[in-house]
């Protein structure tokens, strides 16, 4: 709980000689949360309470989210301090990795992982999922499009037998040209953003290009995980290994948050209901915390109820309704 964590945050601040800001987007199955633009004002509130300070330690756990939201968050923090470090207790993927690129150093535990930053496109003109619910479209991976083009050129020798126009014609038969245009813009944007962020952590331009190329496409999969040794020794990021005392503080903070957000327990309405016909619930899915600013929490609240429906001929089925009564941030 927050009261216990505030003690740990103080210990972490004394150890790092910094101000601690904590941002967690939970990945509890069934109640996943992601980095989004809705969090910006709450970061402003926290940073206003912290005030201008020489160093901020951003304690970050996330599976990712919106690229531009991540860009806005890291640049907002830079307005309040001259030095940012990211502390990764465990997962710090996708948009979380992008935020980490803007730090002077990244403190990674032995179980911490970074990940590729290649984004996916959500666009109204994306193709619909085959046999899926009406109106539900598929996400388009920026690097999947690039992978298709390279497959056709390198493996199928497409550039030797056909012209580029034919290649694009085949691609646009399944993906709208406006979406393809957005894919190109997004790919260019993510490389530009990451290059600008890395300038504070890596000074060699060739090394910066290698890091970006790997994070954008070289890993081969968006699910690829990058542990501490690879991040430090192969990618060349400025990675710090915590000593035993620091690790215990980082782990104690994570364990307390994991228990409160129930990160390792799937959201199971049937289990929550138990033998009851109706039951209210309130669960935390994300948080932003600091010592001077206290805590902001993204909550989902609702009412679970059992319902019996008739299935002809002469059969019944029990379903559970989830009526959300509130979903948003509270202090």
Image (cartoon, rainbow, N blue to C red):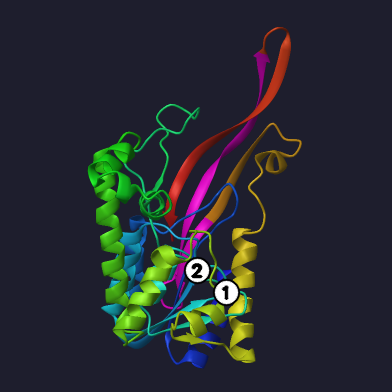
Q: Position of residue 172 (x, y in %)?
A: 29, 38
The quarter of the image holding the N terminus is bottom right
Q: Position of residue 250 (x, y in %)?
A: 58, 80
Q: Which residue is mark 1?
A: 112
Nearest the viewer among 292 and 8 is 8
Q: For the residue labelled by badge 2, is the local secondary structure a helix, a strand or a loop? A: loop
Q: Pick out the residue farthest to the right.
A: 275
In the shown orientation, is residue 27 left or right of residue 180? right
Q: Pick out the residue farthest to the top.
A: 313
Marks 1 and 2 in Cβ contact (< 8 Å): yes
In the image, which residues are magenta?
285-310
Q: For the residue labelled by badge 1, is the local secondary structure a helix, a strand or a loop? A: loop
Q: Residues within 10 Å of mark 2 (few under 14, many from 20)?
A: many
Q: Is residue 125 visible?
A: no
- The circle drawn on residue 92 is 2
In the shown orientation, is residue 60 left or right of residue 202? right
**298 above or below 269?**
below
In the shown orientation, is residue 282 left or right of residue 18? right
**120 above or below 168?**
below
Q: Is residue 328 visible?
A: yes
Earlier along the polypeptide chain: callout 1 or callout 2? 2
Residue drawn 41% across the image and 77% down it: 292
Q: Quadrant of residue 110?
A: bottom right
Q: Position of residue 304 (x, y in %)?
A: 61, 36
Residue 290 colored in magenta in the image: yes
- Our reading of the magenta stretch's main secondary structure is strand
Residue drawn 58% across the image and 46% down it: 30
Residue drawn 42% across the image and 40% down it: 138
Distance, label 1 to label 2, CA atoms, is: 7 Å
- The circle drawn on residue 312 is none
Q: Position of residue 170 (x, y in %)?
A: 32, 37
In the shown orientation, is residue 231 left or right of residue 211? right
């Amino acid at each position: 709980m927050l009261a216990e964590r505030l003690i740990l945050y103080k210990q972490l601040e004394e150890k790092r000689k910094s101000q601690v800001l904590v941002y967690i987007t939970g990945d509890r199955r069934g109640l996943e949360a992601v980095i989004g633009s809705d969090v910006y004002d709450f970061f402003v509130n926290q940073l206003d309470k912290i005030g201008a300070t020489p160093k901020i330690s951003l304690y970050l756990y996330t599976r990712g989210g919106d690229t531009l939201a991540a860009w806005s968050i890291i640049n907002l923090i830079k307005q309040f301090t001259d030095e940012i470090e990211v502390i990764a207790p465990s997962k710090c993927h996708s948009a979380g990795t992008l935020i980490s690129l803007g730090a002077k150093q990244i403190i990674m535990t032995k179980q911490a992982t970074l990940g590729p930053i290649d984004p996916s496109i959500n666009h109204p003109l994306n193709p619909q999922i085959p046999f899926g619910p009406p109106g539900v479209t598929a996400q388009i991976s920026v690097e999947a499009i690039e992978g298709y083009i390279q497959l056709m050129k390198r493996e199928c020798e497409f550039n030797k037998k056909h012209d580029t126009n034919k290649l694009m014609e085949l691609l646009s038969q399944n993906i709208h040209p406006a979406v393809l245009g957005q894919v190109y813009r997004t790919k260019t944007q993510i490389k530009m953003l990451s290059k600008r962020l890395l300038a504070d952590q890596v000074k060699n331009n060739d090394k910066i290009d290698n890091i970006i190329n790997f994070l954008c496409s070289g890993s081969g999969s968006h699910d690829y995980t990058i542990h501490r040794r690879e991040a430090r020794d192969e990618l060349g990021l400025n990675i710090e290994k915590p000593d035993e005392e620091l690790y215990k503080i980082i782990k104690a903070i994570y364990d307390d948050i994991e228990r409160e957000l129930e990160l390792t327990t799937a959201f199971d309405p049937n289990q929550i209901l138990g033998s009851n016909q109706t039951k209210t619930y309130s669960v935390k899915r994300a948080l932003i915390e600091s010592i001077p600013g206290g805590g902001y929490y993204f909550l989902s609240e609702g009412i679970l109820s059992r319902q019996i429906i008739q299935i002809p001929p002469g059969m019944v089925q029990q379903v559970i309704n989830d009526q959300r009564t509130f979903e948003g941030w509270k202090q």
